[in-house]
């Protein structure tokens, strides 16, 4: 699986951009998105920019990736949200949502309009 990372353009050269996002800095191919300028936001897969993003959309994608990391136990808890088991440093932070597999039959029925 390949996940797109929102990254902001720092510097450009023809066909490429130096970008920064989620603690990583790298040079990416910009052939699929055309010319970019410092400050632009791109959705980057592997080493290539695949889509231009608004700053708002980049923040949304970044927040979603934070939730995924928390659910997988890869990131620390968000500010003001202690880990579910502070005694175990490997315990994942509470992501703030429950997966459908943990829902009750009533919750699933509400989601599906009464179909189970």
Image: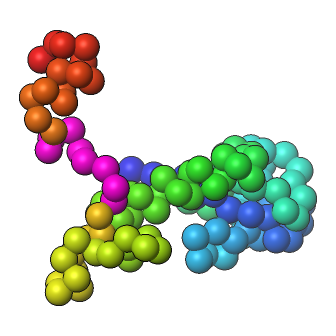
Residue at x-position 22% and y-position 71%: 84
Residue at x-position 79% and y-position 64%: 9
Q: Is residue 15 visible?
A: no
Q: Is residue 109 visible?
A: yes
x, y percent for residue 28: 70, 63
Left or right placement of residue 93 versus residue 67 in this view: left
User: Closer to the camera, 31 or 109?
Assistant: 109
Highlighted range, magenta: 95-102
- Displayed quadrant of residue 32: top right
Which SS type dominates the magenta stretch?
loop
Left or right placement of residue 65 versus residue 29 in this view: left
Reply above or below: 33 against 41: above
Residue at x-position 14% and y-position 44%: 102
- Displayed quadrant of residue 73: bottom left
x, y percent for residue 72: 29, 63
Residue at x-position 39% and y-position 50%: 1
x, y percent for residue 109: 17, 21
State yes or no: residue 58 in magenta: no
Instruction: Count how many numbered circles sit on residues in the image.
Output: 0
Colour setting: rainbow
User: Closer to the camera, 112 or 46?
Assistant: 112
State yes or no: residue 101 in magenta: yes
x, y percent for residue 29: 73, 58
Reply above or below: 46 against 75: above
Left or right placement of residue 59 versus residue 9 in this view: left
In what quadrant of the picture does the C terminus appear? top left
């Amino acid at each position: 699986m390949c996940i797109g990372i929102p990254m902001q353009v720092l510097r450009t050269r023809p066909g490429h951009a130096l970008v920064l996002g989620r603690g990583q800095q790298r040079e990416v191919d910009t052939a699929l998105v055309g010319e970019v300028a410092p400050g632009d936001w791109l959705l980057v897969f592997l080493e290539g920019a695949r889509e231009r993003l608004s700053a708002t959309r980049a923040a949304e994608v970044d927040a979603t990736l934070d939730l995924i990391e928390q659910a997988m136990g890869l990131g620390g808890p968000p500010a003001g949200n202690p880990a579910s088991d502070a005694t175990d440093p490997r315990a994942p932070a509470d992501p703030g949502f429950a997966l459908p597999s943990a829902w009750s039959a009533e919750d699933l029925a509400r989601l599906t309009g009464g179909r189970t």
